Amino acid sequence: MKRNLLLVVSLAALVLFLAVQLYMIRSIWQQKEEILLMRYRDLSREGLSVLLSGKKTNGFEKAMEVADKLAGYLVTEELGKLSDASDTMALSKMALKETTAVLYKNEMLTPFLAAFIDNAGFDKDFKSVITISKFEIFTPEGTLPIVDTVYAAPPKNLLFINTFREEHNNFLIEYHYLIDLTHKNSMVFKEALLSFALIIASTLIVFFVFGITWRNLMEERRLSELKSDFINNMTHELKTPLSTITVAARTLEKEQILSDRERVLETAQMIGKQSVHLNQLINTILEVSFLERTEFELDRHMVQVDELMHQIVSSFLTSCDGCAVIREQYGANGTSVTLDLVYFTTMINNLLTNAVKYCDREPEIDVTTAIDSGNLEITIADNGIGISRDHIDHIFEKFYRVPYGNIHKTKGLGLGLYYVRRIATAHGGDVAVSSKPGKGTTFRVKIPI
């Protein structure tokens, strides 16, 4: 319960942390964007002041001369051709379009500001935007209004620099000069890159630490479950021989049993057999505990592999009263390998025992040997119930047992395959497994020659 509560609180804290990081990224972006816009606005206005004070011009002097000539041409050549309101409207549109083109083509403020901003060490990649809010042409009959609008605040990407109002021989004009930062987002990103990198790095570190913590908690939970299963299995395994011994001992206390020599011998043999079984269980647990604290100390001897394998299989069949059909096919061709006979025999016996134990029909086992790339390869394939994909990655872990409904249907402590891998790795090799549920399982042990 406490572990689950801790996980929920940790997830909530992680989500909150992520929300804070996103808020910080958004705030930093807005801050950097405002600073960028303010910087370009201030530099542009400073550059305009320098131009006005130094060259006594605002950069539109030539444009105004050309626009004045255009206005004079419209008055002298085009104004007399007007016949109705539609002609006047068309003339106004043409005058506004041509005057705007003249301003863009002839103004010198933009190149001056670009050079000024570049000298200040900032990106000069921007465009100029000129909007005319008031434009009147002077005619002999009076003033011809071309446009007269109220200036509206520009979009966020456009920076307002200044408003100019000028009156010349043939016209009056009021226009606004703005700059458009074409690549504003990339500029802001460059400015905020270091901050973003630190935020992302810290977020990744937090997620990484949380992932490790989560994995450790899940592993702790899994090990706790394995421990509980092991205790249950061990309790059952120990109770079986103990119960048998207890019942047998009580049987021997009865007068009618003591007078029957055969019954006494049978009961005594039962006690002896169960005592051996109990002793084996205890020794197995103690041995694994010992191996956890120390490394294997192998007593290696040079042995002929095929001959040793045949002896192990024959002894196994004898001990289990022919409990399986074992087909032997040895291809080591007389190769000898240095092995620890006791550990190696235990490893093969464990694999054969599992092949018999986890089979819901007549066990059939194929035992083969081969030499492959300087390794002795031993394959033990069965026709048992198989192992599902969810469990196959864990079968070599200590105390792990694949659940098959009734956990006590097949006895064991979850140590056999763990022991198999420890023995294989102690010999410098390894063990691999492949399985199909309902079809069987194949173990492949590789040991360097």
Image: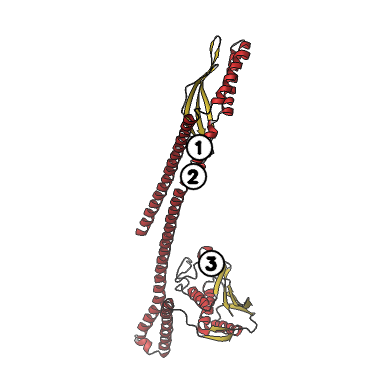
Q: Is residue 154 above or below residue 338?
A: above
| CB atoms of marks 1 and 2 within 8 Å | no
Q: Residues within 10 Å of mark 1 (few under 14, many from 20)?
A: many
Instruction: First in sequence, mark 1 or 2: give its number.
Output: 1
Which dot marks residue 189? 2
Rendering quarter of residue 429: bottom right
Residue position marked by numbered label 3 in the rendering: 387
For the N terminus, give its image quadrant.
bottom left
SS state under label 1? helix
Q: Is residue 28 above or below residue 438?
A: above
Question: To which residue does mark 1 refer?
Answer: 116
Q: Residue at (50%, 78%) from the top-left corner?
A: 426
Where the C terminus falls, by quadrant? bottom right
How crowded is the residue under tag 2: few (<14 C-alpha within 10 Å), some, or many (20+)?
A: some
Residue 135 visible in the current orientation: no
The first of marks 3 and 2 along the sequence is 2
Residues under labels 3 and 1: Cα distance?
75 Å
The numbered mark, 3 or 1, whose residue comes first in the sequence reads 1
